[in-house]
Image (cartoon, rainbow, N blue to C red):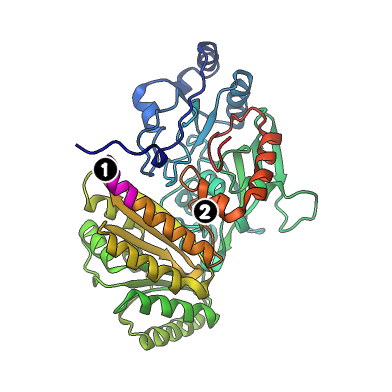
Amino acid sequence: MNAPLPTDLLPDVRLREVPTAFLDALKARFGAQCSTAQAVREQHGRDESAFTTVPPPAAVVFAESTQDVADAVRLCAEHRVPVIPFGVGSSLEGHLLAVQGGISLDVSRMNRVLSVHAEDLTATVQPGVTRKQLNDAVKDRGLFFPIDPGADASIGGMAATRASGTNAVRYGTMRENVLALEVVTAQGEVIRTGSRAKKSSAGYDLTRLMVGSEGTLGIMTEITVKLYPLPEAISAAICSFPSIEAAVRTTIAIIQMGIPIARCELLDGGTVKMVNAYAKLGLREEPMLLMEFHGSPTGVQEQAELVQEIASEHGGQAFEWATTPEERTRLWTARHNAYFAAIQSKPGCRAISTDTCVPISRLADCLLDSVAEADASGLPYFLVGHVGDGNFHFGYLIDPDNAQERATAEALNDRLVHRALALEGTCTGEHGVGLHKMGFLRDEAGEGAIDMMRTLKQALDPHHILNPGKIFTT
């Protein structure tokens, strides 16, 4: 029998009372939109993290409008009950777990694209709209939304975690691509931040304050985002390398030469093997870069030729090019299936997922030492990276009930993150803090910054009802 997990490896669960009068008021207001069924609660009490011991929320409310969100939050404020926004449940760091109890506020039914201003390259959507849904809605106008974290995440969840993904090296993250918000505050008031204008000097930047706040400062009910013209030409390629170092050195050279590559993703050989088994592909089971080029036909060809030349100098081989949407989709299947391929490779496992981001010049130093440590540990793992912007992800595959495996994975994660911080990087490039990286945030930001965050939280959410226990303990 496995030993019990040490308490320092588990979330700090401190359930707050959920009064019967509150649940009665919730059911009276929302009727069939409110559920206390065990299966529904359990569905909303789990994400893709390895935390499996947190009790589910006491109830789930399915919001269908901004008014629903405001009314639910007002009831929570009146009874001092925690409320946790829920999109599609794809977060990786325990963001949506009810560590202090309360309710889950599911916004997936708020899934309308409210407006598309093609002439201004903007769209306004409800938080439950997914990235694929938005792109389907705007592609006929020759536009697209570039932020692609891999999963078909909701726009609200992506804004809340300041997501980025495979296109960030060219198009930036959610921080750069959210123009304005409608937000419900902890008091149940509806406010608007920002506008559709491309820039503003009007007061505090409340939009940027909310983007990345992980549902701890307000609940987003409308998001206005930037759109981009569909490139005239798109070409994708995969290239295999004799080592991870060769692939990383190639990436560094591409970025430092200023080649405007749109995507540059790394998979290590073990991850490619997992993907082959999962998706029935025949990719070479060696370290691989997946790349994409956007622009004019001439520009794309020039970029591709330069990159192929650089890769060849580092031992890159077996280039495979794709210019049609169908061919590109097949190549990118490898990257987008990596997480689920890894989970399936070890039945019953969970992934201790982590991501860091470092300056591009320090990428090789950070990544290669981390690979050596992971190999020496004996734990199976997967490795993928948005290496074009210095961001990479490890997933250590563990039996969630095996204390030794979890301790080993957390030790690897600890060394990886502190290595990144020592190289002037960050503890998370895009996953967010959630539960899993609270200690690392303190190491990165310092106590003074944490105190300022607490002050902001106290001012905006004095009763700590908005996703409490995340980012930092309260």
Query: How many numbered discs sit on the rendered protein?
Result: 2
Residue 324: quarter of image: bottom left
Residue lying furthest right: 202
Q: Visible in this render: residue 84?
A: yes
Q: Earlier in the sequence, mark 1 or mark 2?
A: 2
Residue at image location 39% in from the left, 42% down from the top = 9
Residue at the spot of label 1:
402
Amino acid at the residue labelled 1: Asn
Q: Position of residue 240 (x, y in %)?
A: 30, 76
Secondary structure, mark 2, is: loop
Q: Position of residue 329 (x, y in %)?
A: 35, 63
Residue at image location 48% in from the left, 85% down from the top = 302
Residue at image location 61% in from the left, 54% down from the top = 445
Region rendered in magenta: 401-408
Looking at the image, residue 180 lies above or below residue 272:
above
Residue at the spot of label 2:
163
Looking at the image, residue 150 lies above or below residue 401:
below
Residue 69 shown in magenta: no
- What secondary structure characterizes most of the magenta part? helix
State the separation of the CA atoms marked 1 and 2. Answer: 31 Å
Marks 1 and 2: CB-CB under 8 Å?
no
Label of residue 469 in the image: none
Determine crowd level at label 1: few under 14, some 14-19, many 20+ residues with C-alpha closer than 10 A. some
Of discs 1 and 2, which sits in the foreground? 1
Task: Please name whichever residue, 377 or 182, is drawn nearer the observer in this view of the structure.
Answer: 377
Looking at the image, residue 315 lies above or below residue 419:
below
